[in-house]
Structures are given as C-alpha cells and as structure tokens.
Image (cartoon, helix red, strand yellow):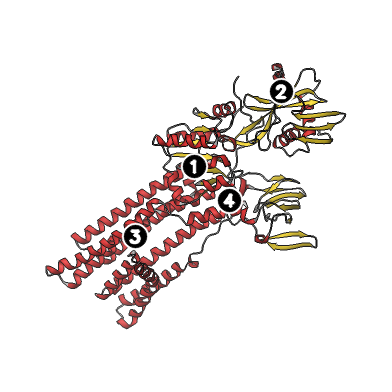
Amino acid sequence: MVARVSTTLTPTRVPSPAHPAPRRRTRVLALPEARWALASTVAFLAALALDLGGLPWWAYGPLYAVAYVNGGWEPALEGLRALRDRTLDVDLLMIVAALGAAAIGQVRDGALLIVIFATSGALEALATARTADSVRGLLDLAPSMATRVTEHGEEPVPTSELAVGDVLLVRPGERIGADGRVLEGASEADQATITGEPLPVTKGPGDEVFAGTLNGTGVLRVRVERDPADSVIARIVTLVEEASRTKAPTQLFIEKVEQRYALGMVIATLAVFVVPMIFGADLTDALLRAMTFMIVASPCAVVLATMPPLLSAIANAGRHGVLVKSAVAMERLGEVDAVALDKTGTLTEGTPEVSAVRPLPGSGLTPDALLALAAAAEHPSEHPLGRAVVRAARERGLRIADARDFVAVPGRGVTAVVGARVIGVGRAGDPVTEPVDPDADAEATRVVDGPRADAPRAAVPGTEDGDTVVLVTGDGLPLGTLALTDRLRPHAPATTAALTALTGTSPVLLTGDNARAAARVAEATGLVDVRADLLPEGKVDAVRELQDTGRKVLFVGDGVNDAPALAAAHSGIAMGRAGSDLALETADAVVVRDELATVPSVVRLSRAARRLVVQNLLIAGTFITGLVLWDLLGHLPLPLGVAGHEGSTVLVGLNGLRLLRESAWRSGQAPFQGTRG
C-alpha cells in the first residue's frame, strides 16, 4: 500500500511574511559615549580652526584640553580599572599614546587620536544598541496594564501583578495582557507576532490566547492560565537576556590573546623607542615613531572582529522568529554538517485531523452521517482525538446533534445517547476483529485540520498505514471507522531538501512513533534514513553515533523526550509554539512561530556570520601589518596612522552590521514547496 500523508484538498496557503514586531531605535545622543564623543569633536574642531588661524596658544590650547578630557576620561578610567586587576587594556594604551604625543609637542595629533578613538567607541556603542533594539522589538508586545475583573467590578492593574486564575476583560483593539483561555465572548486575535499566523484567529470560549496579541472587534473575558513570568513573551525575554551574557569561543580566544598581545606590544614599543636612541636618533623623532607604533599595532579591530557579525545575526534571526540563545550558539549553528529531525510536532504539526471516514456495509450511513454521529458523541470530550472529530464535522458544515448521558471511560473511549441510540467512539465493546471492508475506500472522504495527536490513545482498536483508527458503534454494533493522521507541515519537504543541500547529506528521522507512521512522513519529505520506535535514550544514541563518525549534528525537536538529544547534539533547535519547557531550555535556539522553513535559513545566516568574522580578522590583520611595516621601515605620520587604525576598527564593525539587513535573511530562505497527498 502506498503511504499517505494527510493534506487539505483546499489550496495550500502560503504564509505571508510575519508582521514586523514594534521597532525601537536608540537615539544617537541617548548614548553617553556619543555625547562625550560629540563634545570632544566639537572642541577639537574649534581648537583646530583657531590653531590653523594663527591665534596664540592661550586661545586654542584650552579647547584641545577639553577635547582630551571629554573623549579620553572614560577609556582612561576603564583602562586604570583593568590595570588594577592586572589586565592591560587597549583603551589605556590609546590614552598613553595620545598623552605621549602631547608630551613631545604633538598636541594636535594627540587630540585627533582622542577624537577618532572616542568616535569609534561611540559607533561601537551605537551598533550594539541598535542590535539590541532589533531583538527588543520582539519584546515590546505585552501591554504594561490590564483590566482585571473582581467581585467588586473592574480594576486596572500592571500585568506584572497578574496571577493564575485572574479574569481579564479585553476590549476591542486592546492587547491581551496574559497567556490564558477565553471564558466568555467572541472575537478574533492577531497572533502573527507570536505564532506567525498571517490572518486573525477566531477566539471563543475555551480557546487559548497569548499575551501581547491584539484583540479584534469583540469583547473577551480571559482567565489567566500562566504566570506573567512564564508567558511566551517572558520566555523570549529570558532567551534574549541569555544571548547578551555569553560570548563566542572565537571572541574568548581573542580576549585571551589580547592580553599577551598588549604586553608584547608594550615591549615592542619600548624597543622601537630605545633602539634608535642607542644609535643616536633624535629623542622627539624616536618617541613619535614609538607612539605611532603603539597606535597602529593596537588590536582594536581584531577585538571588534567577532561580536558584531554574531550579534547582528542573532538580531536578524530574532526578527524572523528564531531566538538564538547566545553568540556561542549562533557560531555553532554554522558548523553543523548533519541534521537529525524529530517527527511529531517538528516535521508534522502534532495535531490530528480526520483523514478518512468509512461507514461499514449494512450500516445504512453515509460518510457525513457517520461523522456527524461520532462528533455528537465526542462533543463534550476534552481528548485531542475527540476534538479533532468535532472540528472535522464543523468544517464540513454538519449539524452536530445534542447528546446526553455522556460517559468517558479511560482506555475505552466515550459513549453518549444521540437521538435514540447509544453511540460509542473508541472501544465501545470488544475490540473489532474483522478487517475494514476494502471496498469502503470508494466511499471514504477526506477532511482536514484538528488539534494534537502526539499522545497515544488506548481507545484505538489499531492503526492502518500509520493512521490512528477509531471505531464508531451504535447500540453496541459497529457502524464504521474514522482514520486520523498527524498533518505534515507545509514547508517540511522544502526544508529537508534545503538541509540536504546545506550539509551534503539527507537528514535522519528520529522518532518514537511506529515504523509505519515514520515511513509515511519520510516518503513525503524525501528522507531515507528513518529510525522509529525510539525511546529518548535511543535518540541520544543515534545522535552520538552520527557524531562518533566526525559529524557535527543539528537536532530539531519539540517534546520532553527530545530534550536529551537536543543536549547531546552539537546544536539543538526547538519548535517553540508547542515545545515543552525542558526542550526550550535545552535547545540552543527556538523557532517561536513553528515555521520549519526558518531552520535552514538560520543555519545559512550563521555560516554568513562566520564568514564575516574571518573577513574581519583578515581586514584587521592586513591593516595592522601594513601600518606597522610603514612605521618601522619608513615614516608614517601620526595622524595618518591614527586614521588608518581607527578606520580599520570602524570598517570591521560596519562589516559585521551587514547581517542586520533583511537581504541577509532572505538569502538563506528555501523556496516554498507545497505538499500533495
């Protein structure tokens, strides 16, 4: 039998670009580094004009002093603090070089060094702030206030003070203040910023809502079901904060080298000064050459080469719904050369849908009539499969009759009186032993959509071709069967193809589901290596087996059972919408909107960041080498040395910020491919 994956017969909807999160941009003069740099620059330009105009020293000298103080006090203070901790800071070396230039009468050149150094620091601070702005745009979603309903009426309260069980009143056009469930009312919510759904989602009693999503035209009463500190938005905040507290291995290596390099540079500077003096060089010329050497040999550009590309990549990925926890994680994502994928909730949506309705011969029922009876019996049920049956009937426009005497028996299913008959769904009596009539396929019809089906249901007589099959009975007699299947994500085939192209090998499917269901998904997504019926430790063993061959494995999953594999893999990505807390905490990155197509995109973005780091190191090394040789073998003017050194620092910083552009993300997207049943 040919394996099948359930898909809708209506046209596949291509998700539109996610609605952009609110954007906050830090103003330049809001940064103290920018204000001090501006004051230093203004003082320097005024002093330079007076100096070149031939005015006496007392007219422009104080202005040069102001430029020195405004631009140099902060790096000097930081450098002295580092020196107190027995660390030699590059900032301090720059200040020493500027003061040395002033000591030998090169006040103008020293002031220029201070101005360029302060401006470079301001640009670095602005780049960091703008990167943080891009990430924080995802966090400016939840409102600061909400309307809580109490026995005494309504009261406005800060959302941070809400507790589980509180009831909120959400008026039209307001943002929902907490994760919860609708008690009363009907409306629609724009959830694009959280789930990526391009259209507003209808909300009514029993539906889940998320903090920060925008209510539509109706009024809702919502019961808070999650503490504000545990909301989706709060989890995003935590992940982003973690990203800001970590550094990539390359950066840590550079910082270790920086200390030794700085010490060696001081020794070399002394040699550049002393050796010419021994051979009779002029004091001023020797000191000027040494000061120039100290400036151009400083590793500022090397130190700045690593973090801007990685932080920019983190910010860009965050804008598109992928939260990478740290620069370490972003760097590691670009190293992967093999991928392992979970099935349920990752390649599939983790939500069951009724894929076939088969009345038994002699039942006298049409497929619609059988589905309507099953939906009537399941209507009061909270079981995921029961909700899928009810949804299927509603989507067909079937009338769901009122049922009474509803009984749910764990391990057997549900029964209810519908009309004059007792209808059962699941195991209403003894298990069915006779096979389903194969001729019923001619009458079977397909319906779509439904909630989760990852938990096995004991009320199921069996499976068929990987589908879950339930029996519908009337007064104890079999009437027909319903087949339910887990729906494949629309982008799954395109994603697996993109990952294959990236790594050179087809991803491995690791699942705890049965072999038939796994084979069905593998066929639909083009996967060859399929490992089914795995316990959590089995997934870990499979990941380690791949890594023992020298591969660096990326594992993508969503459930508690995936957490060990996420931890064991070189890199791990969790699906965030329905992912377990443990999976979200263990993974290196989280796909907030469950858009599977973003997985290859973020890997490509990470590889682009790593390439920019290498480019920056080459740029910095080339500038330092060229300027040092010029100073040692020829005569490098101090202003030109300062301009070359600080210019290379600014250049590598701006080069890293290229990854903030939208085009950097789009270049990593795989073309959308629909699925066919």
The local secondary structure at tag 4 comes to loop
Q: Is residue 667 visible?
A: no
Foreground tag (4 vs 2): 2
Which residue is at a point 31% across and 76% down the rendered structure image?
51
Q: Are marks 3 and 1 in contact (CB under 8 Å)?
A: no
Residues at circles 2 and 1 in contact by the CB criterion of under 8 Å: no
Q: Amino acid at mark 2?
A: Ala
Front of the two marks 4 and 1: 1
Q: Which residue lies most toward the right here?
A: 420
- Label 3 sits on residue: 300
Q: Label 3 is placed on what type of residue?
A: Cys
Q: Identity of the amino acid at label 4?
A: Pro
* Tag in front: 2 or 1: 2
For label 2, the SS is loop
Q: Secondary structure at mark 3?
A: helix
For mark 1, give the secondary structure: helix
Could you say which disc has been placed on residue 20 in the image? 4
**Badge number at residue 272:** none
* Residue bearing the label numbered 1: 601
User: How far, Cα to Cα, is label 4 from label 2?
Assistant: 43 Å
Q: Which mark is first along the chain, 1 or 2? A: 2
Instruction: State the separation of the CA atoms marked 3 and 4.
Output: 35 Å
From the image, tell me which residue sits under label 2.
Answer: 444
Q: Earlier in the sequence, mark 3 or mark 4?
A: 4
Q: Is residue 569 left or right of residue 420?
A: left
Q: How far is the residue under mark 3 from the one under mark 1?
A: 31 Å
Q: Residue at the location (23% across, 69% down)? A: 288
Mark 4 is surrounded, within 10 Å at the Cα level, by few (under 14), some (14 to 19) or many (20 or more) other residues, namely few
